[in-house]
Image (spheres, rainbow, N blue to C red):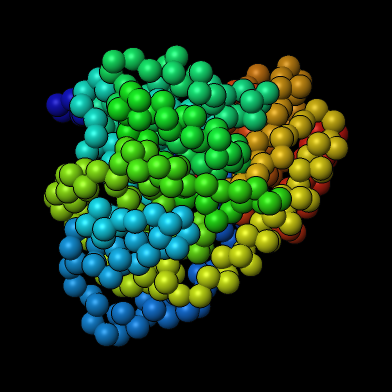
Amino acid sequence: MKELSRIYSSVAPSATLSVDAKFKQMKADGIPVVGFGAGEPDFDTPDHIKQAGIRAIENGMTKYTPAAGTVPVRKAVARRLKEDFGLDYDYTSIIVSSGAKACLFAVFSALLNPGDEVILPAPYWVSYYEQIKMTGGTPVEVFAPASQHFKITAQQLEAAITDRTKALVLNNPCNPTGMVYTKEELKALADICVRHDLYIIADEIYYCLVYGGADFVSVASLGEEIKNHTIVINGVSKAYAMTGWRCGYAACGDRQLAKVISNSISHMIGGIGAMNQAAMEEALLGPQDSVEEMRRVFEERRDYMVPRVNSIEGVSCLKPDGAFYLMMNIEKLIGRTLGGTEIRTAGDFAMAFLEKGLVAVVPCDAFGISGYVRWTYATSMDNIKEGLDRLERFLGES
Ligand code: PMP
Ligand code: GLU
């Protein structure tokens, strides 16, 4: 057989989805495992949103739509961006596609030429790294240590820029760290991007999920020049518990970019399910109370988990301000034997904890940091209590 694509053959499977697949397999085999792998809200999609999807099917919304999404759904995105951040986007600058994941891929594809560098603050969500490579770019990691609350500084950004740098990925609130950049921190980073004429790929998919009074600021709202350089990536998966509907969007400060993206997805995907777009429109324009209700539940879970993790000998965590992830430091466990396995990496820990402790967590090596595993608290309080009880037993027994 002829050789497969060299770029695609080098792509690693998504660490989050791999853990989730293994967890689901074990569950299907009757093993009583508890899952903290893939981050997706455990809530059902609110009923008024489901009904909008059902109504759309009944009313014959079962045909092709424009590749970039229907006009009403793109106008709904524009209205939400206006209401939430005071941002003005014409609907023609907005692309609706198959989840934020596909929007990100379309943005990287439209922006990058071979060898272009994209600055990627680490720890990062696993898919950015692979998508940048898949679209011919070079990810340039800038590491933000725990002492900086996992946030990069303006000095670090400036130092990483070369004449090949095209863009910065700014995921705020961040998956996997849960950290939220302040307005001042964002402005300092964005000013550098504008000065160097870099695009800012601002993934704000967790913007509704901030806790403890933390203030979320959309980087695009910090000035006209910044907005022009920014592509806001967002969607309804997390805020409205709609992961399976596969609806996300990219709002482009540069209208030419929106056109290039729209052209490319017209050949690749076409418009996503018409009925899904109708449900997304309802999510964005309909009652917003469920967003706050879910946010409050996530906050309660975070407030339970953080002190409990920090009370367990050998592990620790910082308190996240947003999203629904907690990164647990396991460096003190390196060198110990747990569940019959000598722990040398976070991957060893995660595997032993899954197989012997029956708890699924994601090793953070694929997120660009070693010595940590990620828990999601997008799962019930009962599961969280059980998972942490099992952690205590697992560490105590070994
Ligand atoms: N960005 C981040 C930071 C995420 O955690 C996720 C979760 N999968 C996505 C984008 C993609 O979300 P979706 O494709 O479900 O809209
Ligand atoms: N974003 C979620 C996570 O990081 C869902 C899985 C995925 O798409 O990667 O767990």
Q: Position of residue 184 (x, y in %)?
A: 55, 35
Between 31 and 203, the residue placed more toward the observer is: 203
Q: Residue at x 58, y 39 (%)?
A: 182
| Residue 343 figure quarter | top right
Task: Relative to 170, say whether 299 is above or below.
Answer: below
The quadrant the N terminus occupies is: top left
Q: Residue at x 62, y 23 (%)?
A: 145
Is residue 86 among the parts visible in the rendering? yes
Between 188 and 372, the residue placed more toward the observer is: 188
Q: Position of residue 336 (x, y in %)?
A: 76, 20
Task: Relative to 345, say whether 169 is above or below.
Answer: below
The quadrant the C terminus occupies is: top right
Is residue 29 among the parts visible in the rendering? no
Q: Position of residue 194 (x, y in %)?
A: 35, 30
Would you say 192 lies left or right of 165 here?
right
Between 331 and 295, the residue placed more toward the observer is: 295
Would you say 300 lies left or right of 259 here?
right
Q: Position of residue 2 (x, y in %)?
A: 14, 26
Task: Relative to 64, say whether 51 is above or below.
Answer: below
Task: Relative to 122, say whether 28 is above or below.
Answer: below
Q: How many marks?
A: 0
Q: Residue at x 76, y 47 (%)?
A: 305
Would you say 387 lies left or right of 4 here?
right
Q: Residue at x 39, y 78 (%)?
A: 52
